[in-house]
Every structure is written in C-alpha cells, then in structure tokens.
Image (spheres, rainbow, N blue to C red):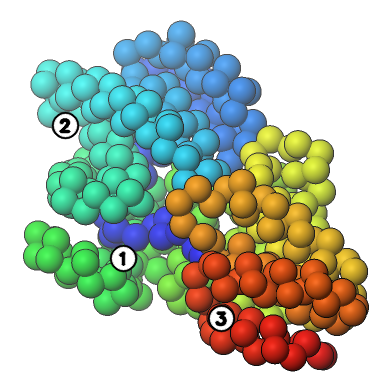
Amino acid sequence: MVLKIKFIFPVLFITALQISAQSYDWVRHDSLVKSGVNQIYGIEFDRAEKTFDIVAKEYPAHPSCKFFKAMITWWRILLNLDDESMDEKFYDQLEEVIDICDDILDNNEKNSDAIFFKGGALGFRGRLLAIRESWFKAALDGKEGLALVFKAYEADPKNRDVQLGFGIYHYYADVIPQRYPAVKPFMVFFPKGDKDRGLKELENVAWNGRYARLESRYFLMTLNFQFEENMNEARKWGDLLLKDFPNNPNFQKYYGLTFVKENNYKQAAEIFGDIFGKCENNKPGYNKRFKREASYYLGMDYKIREKVDSAAHYFEISEKLSRELDKENESGFLINTVFYLGMLYDQIGMREKAIRYYKETLKLKDRNDSHKYAELYLKSPYKK
C-alpha cells in the first residue's frame, strides 16, 4: 500500500470556512454555505455547484462563492490525486479569490471576510503545491498564510474556527520536519511547532467549530492514522464523518485502512466490500482507484481465510486495474497482486499459471523480497 502524502506542510491547510458578520442576510448566507459544504463532503458536486451559483447571485461581491467553487475542484482532485489535469483550473480559481480579497482589503484592511478567504485560498494552494512537491512555492504561500491566521485571530478572537489554522500549524510544524527532512530548510521562516497544542486546538474546532468543524475532523482522522498511528482515535473521527457522509470514498477508505493497519482484515473487508459495491454501481466519486484498492484488500481477506478462488478473483481485478492506472511507476498493489496470484495458483495446482506470475514478478520492482521468493517458488512450488 502506497499512501500519498496529503497533509504534509504545516501551515498550508489554513481553513477558509469562516465567515464573519457584515451587512448581509447572514442567516440566509450561512444556510446556503452550510448546505453547499455538506454537498461537497457528500460528493454531490453538481448540487454543490448549483448551491454556490445561488450564493454568487445573491452575494456577488462576497468571496465565498468563488472560494467554495474552488473547493469543489479541490475535492475532485483529492479523489484522484494522480490526475493533475485540474490543477491549473484550481490555481486559477484560487487566484480569483485572492484578487477579490485584495480588492476588498485595499478599501478596508481589517475586513475579516477578506482576511479569512484569502488565507484559505493561500492555504489550499499551498496544500496542492506541497502534494506536488513544489516546496519553495508552498513555503511562500505558507508564510503569507500564517500571517493571515494571526490577523484573523486579532480580528475576531472568539471565532473558534480560526483555531483550525493554529492547530494545523502547531501540529505539522512539529511533526513534519522530523518525518520529511526536505521540509526542514523552509522551517527557519516559521515559528516553532507544538504537536500537543495543535491536537487540542484541532479537537476544540472539531467539537465546537461553526464552519470548520468537518474539516477539523477530517484532519484528526488522517493525522491520527498517518502520523500518530492511533487507530482507535482515527476511527472515532471517522465514525462521526461517516455518520453524516456515508458515501464519501475518502472517509471510507481511511476508516477501512485503520483495520488494515491492525491486520484486522475481517473488519477491513466489510468497509472495502461496501466501497467495491459502490464502485460497481458507479456511485459518484467511487472511481477505479478506489475499486483497485478495495479489490486488493478483499483479496487479502480471502487469502488469509484460505478462500483461494475468491482471493484470486479479487486479486485479478486489482491487477487489471493496476495495469490501467500505473502509468509511470509500478504500485505496491500491482507488485503484490502479481506475486500473490503466483502463490494462489500454486496452491490449487495450476503450476503453469503460477510460473507465469512468478516470472512477471521478476520483471517488476523488488518489494519486500518479492524477487527472492519468486525465484524460490520458480524452483519449487509454493505450499501453504
């Protein structure tokens, strides 16, 4: 399993889901924004587009409509991070948000809406730049974004949503340089991090935030999975997210992976079985990448339970999808499935087919001594 680094630069994820009071009908605005944000997390992108079209019509001078339109694009990217075809569209949308906010700030440098949404646009732009490993540009956005977090706090210290920016920064500024040395040179530009403080701030927003509550829960689920390796805590936040958004494949995937991490494939198979079924039924967001991953973990579950035919069935699906998806680099899914299929066909006496898969394994990158064992089983059939 290869996990993309999705949350890897400290201040780059400053939220822009905060809206402060002005002379608008904020009850109406808040209701529209909340509905649209829920539609984004629910992978109802077409409905979200229509909702934010209404926001644009009724609040044309406000940056919220353009920002949340960009967030729809962000989630389309997030569901298929290897596809960079929408990156430029996303950057252009965020640049529009920044330009609108700058125009507002030219007339009123303390306009809290403009501060929030400009910070959010910089944060999400930096977030994608970090994913694409464009560290210098990401650092520049992070530096400017951090200043806006402090400015936003000064504008409204009681706004709990602002703490999402602080929480993300304090946590990642402590953890990331230790995990990814390439980031260290850029950290001289930033204040010192504090992991424990960051967790407390994120949890405060996760329970008490107004607009950033869901984003904070998402961060807590992923950082507990990826960095803290606390699967129970990751599942706690995953349970809350899936209760409201049962058809978000990213939420489901991370939830299922918490069980994989514990080698609890029985529980993992329940989650990935549901994902696989939704992929088969073409549920929005459930693409080939999720199907490839789901079929792989279903195959693993059957393999462990010695259901050889079923294991081979799902591994063959995973192999086929991997060959479609692995354009430049061979994924761990492909390497493992090819090797495991050789072992499975040996178990049921299909030696010629097993040999073919072992030879194919040797053509792929070596992973966890796959070459060593493929050569061994070419000489002598694998036996359980």
Q: Which of marks 1 and 2 is nearer the N terminus?
A: 2
Q: Position of residue 122 (x, y in %)?
A: 26, 39
Q: Identify which residue is drawn at 34% across, 45% down.
A: 128
Badge 1: residue crowd in 10 Å (few <14, some 14–19, many ≥20)? many
Q: Which one is earlier in the sequence, the residue at label 3 or at label 2?
A: 2
Question: In the image, is residue 190 above or below residue 66?
Answer: below
Does dot 1 land on a helix, a strand or a loop? helix
Question: Disc 3 marks which residue?
Answer: 371
Foreground pick, 297 / 49:
297
Query: Which residue matches tag 2?
Result: 110
Say which residue appears at 28% left-offset and 59% top-offset.
10
Circle nearer the N terminus (3, 1):
1
Residue projecting furthest to the top: 57
The residue type indicated by label 1 comes to: Tyr
Circles 3, 2 touching at the beta carbon (< 8 Å): no
Please identify, in this view, whether the residue under mark 3 or under mark 1 is nearer the observer.
Answer: 3
Residue 46 lies, with reference to residue 317, above or below; the image says above
Q: Which amino acid does label 2 sit on?
A: Lys
Q: Mark 1 points at which residue?
A: 172
